[in-house]
Image (spheres, rainbow, N blue to C red):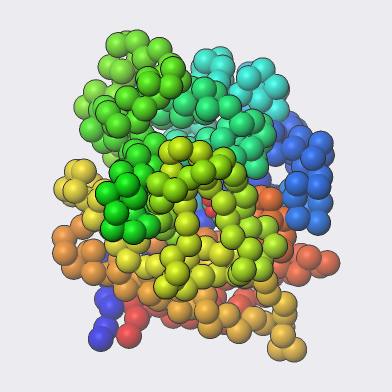
Amino acid sequence: MRYGFPDGFTWGTATAALQVEGATREGGRGDSQWDAFCREHPDRVWERATPEVACDHYHRWEQDVALMRDFGHTGYRLSIAWPRIVPNGTGPANQDGIAFYRRLFDALRHAGVEPNVTLYHWDLPQPLAAAGGWENPATLDAFERYARTCFEAFGDQVRLWATLNEPSWSTLNGYVTALHPPLRHDYRAAVRVAYNMMLAHARVGRLYRAMGGTGQVGIAQNMCPVYPATDSARDAEAARVADAVYNRWFIEPLLLGTFPTEAVDLYRRHGLLPDMPSRDLALFEGGSLDWVGVNYYFPHYASADATETRFGLNTSGNKEEDCHFSIKGLFKFVRNPKGRYTDWAWEIYPQGLYDLLARMHAYRPGLPIYVTENGIGAREVLDADGSVDDAYRIAFVREHLQVAHRAIAEGMDVRGYYMWSLMDNFSWVNGYKKRYGLFFIDRQTLARHPKRSAHWYRDLARANGFD
Ligand code: BG6
């Protein structure tokens, strides 16, 4: 069967500033919460890796844009480093930072690669983090000012904007599992941050319109579909609760204008619900999304049998090491005994992507959807030919594209696919061990080597489909 995609479908890759740029102390860039975290808690990151060098994209961007062009990409999802634009979070804009991205966006457009730009992919300026981060309303004001600066500086170059990357995942790991900065385990703060992030999105979406922006504003969400672990009523209820707090909270205000009752009731019962004044809630009226981005890696299976509170990510790359997400008395996520798993214990389940696309479409039929991240992390080394025979990556992407193709055939407006990632990069607490790229990065020389998947992806982008 031939899997042909609609004309103009975007074939791209995704990265984030902190994960690829490096040059963290150059060009006037300020410190971010992740720079500080890696400095202060080196043992929490695999092999004490830091983002200081990353892929050195800050210096090699011309080469990287040429690779995208030569390999047939038509889109590139990237993020702007907030601390490169506003080094201390609140002060004047850094003209060197602005000039860097203007050059990059210009080069992308000349190469026929449409930028899709995320304003916040977790690199909160450290002074804002130190002052309470996303719990503090002042951070929302600072985010709005930073967004204004970006819209003014790049509005003529960028048509596709995303406000936030994965507010759910960053809130959970920052404030519940305590695996990412600010390393907190505080449910009250988590709910406050989850609420503030939605407000931040809504404020910036409105700002863009008020400034006369003619492009589209969206968000990149990691929606993990949550299935009940068994067919018991208890597990069905656990899945419903998990879905409300994990997924629905982060999308429904933006599409439906309301927060899910299940989550609101739960937080109220536990005294965790922040004040939600009507002037805030009015910001969500009418929805605030022109498009939605789906970052999809794996699904969850919820069990009601949560007898302890325990969190852990697999950072070893050993398949047998489980990830843990268990909140005593509420729900826990368990393995699918029949599932296929990556070395990082993430289940490979393409149907999950279909379910998410269908869900977005059901919320608002005709909503433009992009798959803003999807990919597989693996341990990899260069072979004698200077390449990597990553057949598993090709299989992974193929299977996920097949379900995206089905979604389009059924009438869902899926407009593009950004594979995670263009190149191997700083994989947060996994450091540089977990490789996702179409291009292998030699950690000694930082040279880029196309993997087999890079050639495969080039052919599919050029043919606008595959057999
Ligand atoms: C997403 C993030 O959560 O997943 C990316 O938006 C990230 O930044 C990707 O790198 C894969 O996660 P990880 O932890 O394996 O790098």
245 relative to 457, above or below: above
Horizontal relation, residue 429 to residue 186: left or right? right
Position in image of residue 290 (x %, y %): 29, 39
Position in image of residue 340 (x %, y %): 47, 73
**Which residue lies at the image location 76% right of the left edge and 69% below the top edge?**
442
Horizontal relation, residue 389 to residue 75: left or right? right
Number of marks in the image? Answer: 0
Front residue (pair 283, 246):
246
Is residue 113 something one can see in this rendering?
A: no
In this view, the residue farthest toward the bottom is 384
Corner quadrant of residue 30: top right
Horizontal relation, residue 259 to residue 438: left or right? left
Q: Quadrant of the C terminus?
A: bottom left
Front residue (pair 123, 422):
123
Front residue (pair 232, 187):
232
153 relative to 465, above or below: above
**Which residue lies at the image location 42% right of the left edge and 55% below the top edge?**
300
Q: Quadrant of the N terminus?
A: bottom left
**Which residue lies at the image location 34% right of the left edge and 10% below the top edge?**
277
Front residue (pair 45, 142):
45
Corner quadrant of residue 284: top left
Position in image of residue 359 (x %, y %): 25, 51
Position in image of residue 4 (x %, y %): 27, 76
**Which residue lies at the image location 53% right of the left edge and 83% below the top edge?**
391
43 relative to 462, above or below: above
422 relative to 234, above or below: below
Horizontal relation, residue 272 to residue 408: left or right? right
Is residue 137 something one can see in this rendering?
A: yes
